[in-house]
Image (cartoon, rainbow, N blue to C red):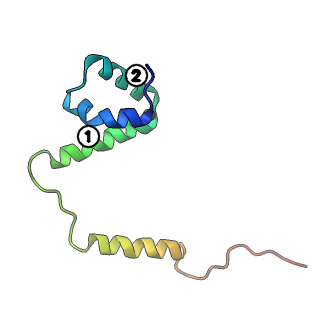
């Protein structure tokens, strides 16, 4: 049976916990071998588990989201925060 990505995602926590059936585990591993997306998701999920593994709550620094939003707004307005004169089309 060929697994689709969304099926793999459903199995990722079981994969990391080692609770998958051997047959499912094999299918998931086969998929991960050729799918970069699912491999990346597996990696980041594993990293999150490592961060939270020792009962410490992983908190973002105070002000982090404010700074992030300010940054995103600045990015959306333009890379340099200055004018929006993109491209100069000579019309002569
Ligand atoms: Zn995939």
Q: Quadrant of the N terminus?
A: top left
As drawn, the label of residue 23 is: none
Horizontally, is 39 left or right of 52 in the view?
Answer: right
- Horizontal relation, residue 79 to residue 6: left or right: right
Q: Residue furthest right?
A: 92
The x and y percentages for residue 90 are: 84, 76
The percent coordinates of residue 51 (x first, y second) are: 19, 48
Count residues near mark 1 (Cα–Cα under 10 Å), then give few for <14, some for 14-19, many for 20+: some
Q: Residue at x 51, y 72 (%)?
A: 76
Circle 2: is it few (<14), some (14-19), or many (20+) Cα within 10 Å?
few
Q: Earlier in the sequence, mark 1 or mark 2?
A: 2
Answer left or right for 88 relative to 67.
right
Residue 19, compared with residue 56, is above or below; it is above
Dot 2 falls on a residue whose secondary structure is: helix
Residue nearest the viewer, comparing 15 with 57: 15
- The CA distance from mark 1 to mark 2 is 18 Å
The image position of residue 8, as x and y in percent, is 37, 32
The C terminus sits in image quarter:
bottom right
Instruction: Give the residue pinned by disc 1.
Output: 46
Considering every residue shown, the one lying at the far bottom of the view is 83
* Residue identified by numbered label 2: 30
- Residue 12 left/right relative to 51: right
* SS class, disc 1: helix
Q: Say if 31 sits above or below 48 in the image.
A: above
Q: Which dot, 1 or 2, sits closer to the camera?
A: 2
Give above or below for 71 relative to 7.
Answer: below
Nearer to the camera, 11 or 33: 11
């Amino acid at each position: 049976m060929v697994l689709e990505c969304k099926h793999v995602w459903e199995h990722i926590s079981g994969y990391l916990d080692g609770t998958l059936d051997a047959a499912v585990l094999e299918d998931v591993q086969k998929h991960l071998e050729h799918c970069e997306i699912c491999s990346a998701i597996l990696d980041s999920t594993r990293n999150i588990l490592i961060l939270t593994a020792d009962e410490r709550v992983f908190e973002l620094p105070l002000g982090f989201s404010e700074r992030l939003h300010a940054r995103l707004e600045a990015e959306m307005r333009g890379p340099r925060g200055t004018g929006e004169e993109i491209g100069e089309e000579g019309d002569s």
